[in-house]
Amino acid sequence: MLRKIVEARALVALAMSGGVGLWGLRVYPIPPDNAFLGLIGEHAPGILLVLTYGYATLWFTTPYFAASLMLSLMAIIVYRRAPHTRIRPLPPYPQPEQRSTLSLVLGERHHQTTPGPAARPEWLIVPQRGLYTGIMVLGAVGTGKTSACMYPYVDQLLRWRAHDPERKLGGLVLEVKGDFCGQVKSMLGRTGREEDYVEVGLDSGFCYNPLHNELDPYAVAYAVATLLNNLFGRSKEPFWQQAYTDLLKFVILLRRISDGYTTFSEVYRYILDDQQIDRDIRRLKADLSEPPDVLVIRLTDFREHCVQRSWAHWFAEDPAHMAHPYEAGLETFLDARKVTYEVRKPKGAGWAARKHQLEAVERWYLHGWSRLDGRLRSSIVEGIVVFLSLFDDSPAVHRAFCPPRSAYTDDPPAGEPKPLPPIDSLLEEGKVLALNFPVGLNPGLARILGVMLKLDFQRAILQRIPQISANPQRTWRDLLFVCDEYHAFATVGEVDPTGDERTFALSRQARLIPIVATQSISSLRSALPGDESWRTLLQCFRTKVFLATSDEFTARNAAELCGRRDRLKAHYSVSESGRDAHISLLTGRPTSTTQSLSASKSYAPHHEYIFAPRVFTQLQNAQAIALPYDGINPLPPQYCYLKPHYLDVQTSYFEHLGRGAI
């Protein structure tokens, strides 16, 4: 109140002087019966007029100057104290169940570039179209990266339209600690979505074969070879990674040509004993010398019963039919499901694709692999089997991630894990798939499983794009990709055929919402190949949330991302001059007869950071600097105060901070 009075002191002084003047003239007017005034009026009426108006003027001016002096002294006292702002409570929190459209509350918004509570706090919200462009959270250990960002953000999205079978979100969750999956399961349980949680792990009840999918053998081989290179020391010589990729690609391709199904354990045994490669090539050459008998079924029956089964040698016989080389097991499978089929010779040339691939494998084996020096082949094999043996020597890992082919053709026996349904069908049903394999069990194995599951997920995401374009009138659900400690699963690079930046660049059209968290930009930089590949990945996430960091490289890049601004900055200069300068005989110091002292103040534009790098190292827990993007326009960088999942969301951050809850 006093500050407002002081700020309007000129108006207040004027009002006070007006009131005092009117009161004084009414109570103490000029006495009309005064003899001296009457005499002056008779002889000099002009002087009497001046005295009359002067007397009236003094009743107004004297109080004005007195009030101005008093208010000026009051201003000195008031401005020495910090202003007291009446802070209003937060507006009602928009509950996810009540939001008409999908959106995400990042946290509280107060002042844009200065810390502290604002008189009218707001919620910092990213709308649906902004979510498709990705969110990256960066923060050091213990800053609230998981508890204040990942948990609340995922909880909000999973609660939206939780009971709408066509709109509820599905997605993939990757993490390395082992507790995030449990939190996601609890979130789904609180919203009545317990059945939507699907977990992949050693004892989850599901088995998952990373090689049983439609991914190109080269993409799978490159991903494995890249991880091998990262796990066991980066070599500046590209030959070893190229050799690993080449060997893995052709072994996987051969097993797919031969049986249509393979596992990492089987690939491990084939690489150890390359005579099996030679035997398979000879057997397949004999089998494919003539067009084989095929089983022909309708395309609709194929999509309903055979898409994700272990028979992988299907080819298009004509636009309405699919064909597969005759197998007794497949015939039994079709009979059990009462699918109409026909056994005959193929009419088209679709079967010749296997023969072409076999010829490529044979050329590699005879003219490439077999001609290498024996010691060089042993070195290449040893570099691969040191990792692939993890799928062979552990019964639990072999059972969960190297299931036999029969697991996909027959119902599993009691106590055995069921094969994981196709990822694309799980996503379209609104299921949330989680990989629960903490790095504490085996860091290398956890990473390769996470990367392979991520590649399978990305394949399903990219396949949605033409489907959405072909059926724009259909209601397509949004999908979620959540990855804590993202640097453990990131793949990117100019030569990587399945880099994350390729998927995230197209994720908006596929309605994918990527949310990842990592400790720093340096963590990504050290995990990715190349010195600048991290920039390619970082640009795919338009919304960035920076928590406190202890990494100067991250702080410097965060400051650059927030940008700079021109600001007028005061410059002061003080100069002293004197005339008749001489040395004093009394003190022995320079002196002068006359001296002058001058000071000057000037303003000049100064180009400075909106948020200096040191600001990012001084943030408190659950306090962040956000670079939001609403899907159309980038919002200015600003302070964002996060809401940890274990605290009341309606209570202000500063109230929690005052109580010591943060």
Image (cartoon, rainbow, N blue to C red):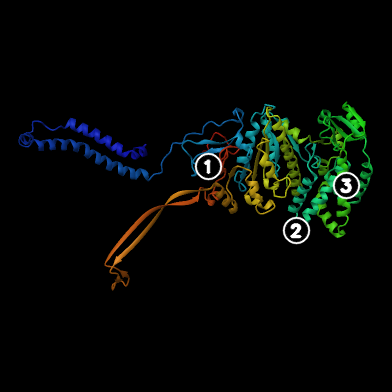
Circle 2 is placed at which residue position? 237
Horizontally, residue 112 falls left or right of residue 197, namely left
Q: Position of residue 166 (x, y in %)?
A: 69, 27
Q: Is residue 117 above or below residue 606?
A: above
Q: Which SS class for mark 2?
A: loop
State whether residue 183 appears in this view.
no
Give the quadrant of the C terminus.
top right
Q: Which SS class for mark 3?
A: helix
Q: Earlier in the sequence, mark 2 or mark 1?
A: 2
What amino acid type should be assigned to the residue bearing mark 2? Glu
Q: Residues within 10 Å of mark 1 (few under 14, many from 20)?
A: some
Q: Position of residue 363 (x, y in %)?
A: 87, 50
Which residue of the protein is positioned furthest toward the front in this rendering? 348
Give the quadrant of the N terminus.
top left
Q: Residues within 10 Å of mark 2 (few under 14, many from 20)?
A: few
Contact, CB < 8 Å: mark 2 with mark 3?
no
Q: Position of residue 260 (x, y in %)?
A: 86, 40
Residue depth check, mark 2 versus mark 3: number of the one nearer the observer: 3
Q: CA distance from mark 1 to mark 3?
A: 58 Å
Q: Quadrant of residue 421?
A: top right
Residue depth check, mark 1 versus mark 3: number of the one nearer the observer: 3
